[in-house]
Amino acid sequence: MDADRSSSAQPKPARPDGEPPVRPESGPLKHMRLDPERAGSDQTEIVPPGPECPDSSDRPVPDQPEHVRPGDERPEGEPMGHVPPGRDRAEGDRPEDERPGGVPRGGMPSGGVRPERVPPEAVRAGGERLEWVRLGLWRVAPAVLGLGLAVLALGPALGQGLVLRYDLVFVPDPPLLPDRGGFPRAVPSDLVVALLSRVLPVEVVQKGLLVGVFVLAATGAAALVPPERRLARLVAAACYAWNLYLAQRLLLGQWALLLGVAGLPWAVRAVGMSGTRPASGARPASGARLMSGARATRRARFAPLTRLGAALLPAAVGGFQAMLVSALTLLPIAVARRRVTVVAGVLALFSLPWAVPALGSGAVTDPAGVDAFAARADGPFGVLGSLLSLGGIWSADAGLPGQESWWLATARLLMVGVGLFGYVRLRSDPDRPAWWGGLAVAAAAGFGLAALGAFQPGREALKWLVALWPGFGPLRDGQVYLAPLVLLVAVGLTAALRSGVSASVGVVAPVLVLPTLAFGAFGRLAAVTYPPDWTAVQRIVNADPAPGALLSLPWGAHRAFAWNGGRIVLDPATKLFERRVLWDDTLYVGLPDGGRLRVRGEDPLNRRAGELLAAGDLARLPARYVLVAASQNGFLLERAGFKTIFRGKDLHLLRR
């Protein structure tokens, strides 16, 4: 045994360069194997070749490498590259394609440290990380799509300055708590804007809110689709963030309403989700291990309430219209989920900022507004066809270029039809969401309210309700309650266009059927800068501690300034000053026959000021300041006791 071991361990004699390699003598090879019973001794066992160690003497032997690592010496007669049983192949014995880093045979990396063999677990971990990255990209895809749609839709509105169109009125340095009368339509949205403007420029705040509408709508609609249906989530995102309802309300400047509508899918998801109370005997989550069992249970019980509160924050910022649309959508789902008390309580709590001042405002509602705000036909298919295509708004100025063309209107109607068909298909789906029936009821109710004003009996019923109690006034603009139908269509499209080419077409279809929303509705939305006169009069009036209102002339609710490109906008003076502003809140709505319908204002103090102006009794005006356009003559005001304190290119300010 000792002799055999000593002979096999003899070093291989060197051979001159150029001589062929020495081949081992033919015959059976002997292999050494440690005896486990004699581990630790210097005894080895010589075993003949067998099934575990086949005879490889007849196989060709590769050339001896030029560099042999210390310790790599092999017994005499053993072929190069052979690995005895029980011993792993050394790094230098493996082919180059099997060695990490491509280290040459017998070589060392430049750092002198030989790379270790990569275990299979590391390979699997790398694949898992790659999969997580891929999943992360799909997860943020709806937000990226919403951002892209926002940039495409707003276009020039994202430039330097502020966008001013109808109710979309932002002013430099807005006051925190302005003194306003009438119905609190801008509560608490104006306060939120004023607070954000203390941190960021008001231009950034406005653009952030407008872009946020698109991103929030896209991500919320995608969240209602199962995550494994990745492409279908983008279909829902595109449809809900790009449609005629959103476009028309955007052109009316109703950003606060759209903010609540954009957050509506998140609220639907919150109401439809199951509770998170852990089952009995289940191990608490890592975050709850530090709490007692009672605290963990209490936290799980209030989890749905917390989710709903967070989801309704955009609607709470939006104010009364956004909260009413949310209530219409969520209450049917809450009935089906047996959560009416919780949902109604959260809705009531978030409505307090505007409901409390509304009850004490003394505002009145003109029943004539039912005729003014009734849904109108904005396409070739009449009022009902316009509503089914998610349009039908009462204002002709909110229309998009070319939206009335028959082929675009037909395409929009077909897309809505596909969405309705897909939503009906979800009824037989085993994974039908818990909010399916409630959203269908809300969409039907919203469409009914929108269509109510399209027919004479419905208008008469609404007039009777408004005359009975001014609180029914928000029902006049019935088209606003189409929001749940818009969400239903977006979700239904994902059921009809699940994957593949059809889903890819569904992602771009909303833009194709409504192309003129792009680039700021072809220039209808653009950013401008206020002339210096506006900030000058703002500083003068806000620095005066003496009480008294400011009267804005000419007497009318809207303005069309040349520096704003002639676009119609609500009088900016109503949001510019910290004191009460008297203005004409009477609304004139154009009729299809060319006439105009007058809707009387809601604020009693504004009505009194209008009556005094009509009678020429300027001395009794309840105002300390009068702000007049520079083109207006202030001679009569000066005779009534007002003195000019500022005269600029655009504005003329007088004080009593």
Image (cartoon, grey):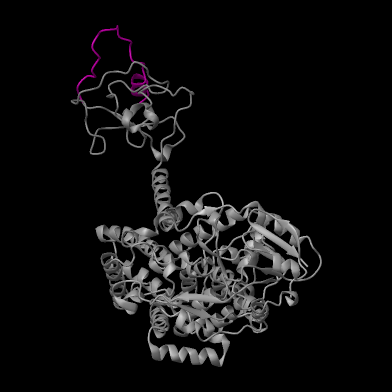
Query: Is the N terminus in the top left, top right, bottom left or bottom right quadrant?
Result: top left
Q: Please name whichever residue, 193 or 46, is drawn nearer the observer in this view of the structure.
A: 193
- Residue 274 visible in the snapshot: no
Vertical order, 448 against 302 (above or below): below
Q: Position of residue 456 (x, y in %)?
A: 39, 89
Which of the 4 image quadrants contains residue 178? bottom right
Q: Please name whichever residue, 582 or 115, is drawn nearer the observer in this view of the structure.
A: 582
Q: Please name whichever residue, 178 or 126, is drawn nearer the observer in this view of the structure.
A: 178
Vertical order, 491 against 428 (above or below): above
Say whether residue 622 is left or right of residue 366.
right
Residue that protrudes farthest toward the left in the picture: 58
Say whether residue 160 is left or right of residue 79.
right
Query: Is the C terminus in the top left, top right, bottom left or bottom right quadrant?
Result: bottom right
Which of the 4 image quadrants contains residue 230? bottom left
Instruction: Let me know if residue 539 is in the magenta part.
Output: no
Instruction: Let me know if residue 22 is in the magenta part.
Output: yes
**Count of marks overlaid on the render:** 0
Which of the 4 image quadrants contains residue 409? bottom left
Q: Position of residue 22 (x, y in %)?
A: 25, 15
Identify which residue is drawn at 26% across, 65% down: 407
- Residue 338 visible in the snapshot: yes
Identify which residue is drawn at 45% across, 32% down: 41
Vertical order, 152 against 322 (above or below): above
Q: Please name whichever residue, 237 or 628, is drawn nearer the observer in this view of the structure.
A: 628
Task: Read off the magenta span.
Answer: 1-27
Identify which residue is drawn at 33% across, 21% down: 8
Q: Position of residue 91 (x, y in %)?
A: 38, 29
Vertical order, 447 against 640 (above or below): below
Q: What secondary structure characterizes most of the magenta part?
A: loop
Q: Position of residue 55 (x, y in %)?
A: 21, 31
